Image: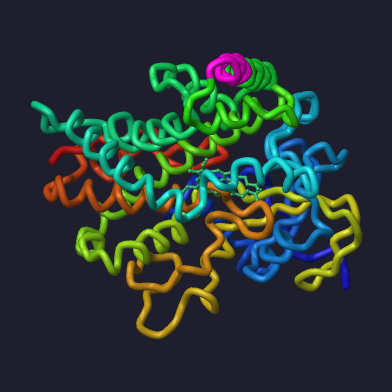
Amino acid sequence: MTSTPTAPAVRMPATHSSGCPFGPPPAYTEAAGTAPMTRADLPDGEPCWLATGYAEVRTVLSDRRFSADLRHPTFPMLVGGRRELITAAPPSFLRLDDPEHARQRRMVTGDFLVKRVASMRPDIQRIVDEALDRMTEGRTEADLVAEFALPVPSLVICLLLGVPYEDRDRFQGLSRTLLNRNSTMEEAKAASDAILAYLRDLAARKREQPEDDILSRLAVRDDLTPEDVASTGVLLLVAGHETTANMISLSTALLLEQPEQIARLADPAALPGAVEELLRLLTIVHTGVPRVALEDVELGGVTVKAGEGVIAMLSTANRDEEVFGGAGHRPTDELDLDRDARRHMAFGFGVHQCLGQPLARAELQIALETLFRRLPGLRLTVPESERQFRTDSFIYGMRSLPVTW
Ligand code: HEM
């Protein structure tokens, strides 16, 4: 075993200067082509490992010798100069290890169970239909991101959490700043403080006058501090709208490029599988998922030393030909809505696997099926080369998507 591989280190974050705009930056796929574990340099210059192979990513995300606790002194930072900010605020359970992670996650698990989400489908369908009614009323053109892809998941998570939708400009703007890799340390800190304060105030009001929503249920618990409630609220609010919004807009843009595949969405038996394939191919967490080794681990032909950072690249793992390829199917860097993509890791893997995945699946299935059913003539109003992708965020997506129908 060795910890000195021969491939040149990838400079993070890699960019999309070339290659398919729907796939991960080419530097990551090139690294994956050389070995399942390669070296990378983080934005602050620190070296780390890039786990690109399917088996290696699974191990990094499920083996307790890798920690998700970002207070660890050598936790790999995907943006430069943010360590000070990040270690000043209490992390949400996304960046804590068990048992604290499990304790906090358990408090909201029930709200996102498959059965619970199934009962929300009529509400989601109504939100989707109303968004389309507003978007199309008296018009034949719109920006699909601003009028459909973003409002739908924002309204759904607001309803669940008990956050007033009228406050959307505020929390959507703050989320963007937090998720933007180019925000300065001061901007990110101000956004983090403001969104935490917003949720702390809202939770304090809900503690006085509880309603039937997640924030009220958390706010009345005596075993949770106001900081715990606020950080869980921020995690759910941010993760609950930005991710699904970008999946809706990217999926729509990709399907408009390959209209012959759209018919699969109209088949109720094929729809869930089609959404899994879109999740697999688009894997919107392009930056990968960070962990730090707590002890020496031999993995993919190298030794990851205790204290070394590893970035688990979900996007390259999700293109593994051995797992997702196969006779009769297109190559794994192409969309094939008939592929069995169920083993994808777009939602991560292991104890931190996405809590909101049943909700995200329901939203994506309902939003995409309804969009293409109600607007069969949907098409872009700008050339494909002029579509605007969101390349500066932890979550890949689209800034705008001008369409007509
Ligand atoms: C298509 C949409 C989504 C994608 C691709 C996605 C992706 C992910 C990924 C990759 C992780 C794991 C991160 C890690 O291991 O460090 C994660 C965690 C998480 N996601 Fe999602 N997510 C989506 C939608 C949602 C929604 C709608 C919610 C709802 C509130 C949500 C809430 C969470 C939470 C709370 C965690 C932390 C889980 C834990 O640490 O135990 N996500 N998500």
Question: Does residue 279 lie above or below 405 as drawn?
Answer: below
Find out whether residue 52 is within the magenta segment.
Answer: no
Quadrant where the image shows the C terminus: top left
What x and y, as percent, mark residue 348?
60, 56
What x and y, as percent, mark residue 186?
68, 16
Is residue 156 or residue 14 the one in the foreground? 156
What x and y, as percent, mark residue 309?
80, 50
Q: Residue furthest left?
A: 138
Place residue 399 in its image quadrant. Answer: top left
Q: Is residue 306 left or right of residue 39?
A: right
Q: Is residue 82 visible?
A: no
Residue ID at (66%, 50%): 289
Q: Is residue 261 left or right of residue 212?
A: left
Quadrant where the image shows the N terminus: bottom right
Q: Is residue 356 left or right of residue 312?
A: left
Main secondary structure found in the magenta portion: helix
What x and y, as percent, mark residue 383?
24, 42
Question: What segment is highlighted magenta in the picture?
Answer: 199-209
Place residue 65 in its image quadrant. Answer: bottom right
Image coloring type: rainbow
Residue ID at (57%, 39%): 394
Place residue 28 in its image quadrant. Answer: bottom right
Is residue 237 or residue 402 the one in the foreground? 237
Find out whether residue 205 is within the magenta segment.
Answer: yes
Q: Residue furthest bottom?
A: 327
Q: Is residue 223 left or right of residue 320?
A: right
Q: Is residue 61 visible?
A: yes
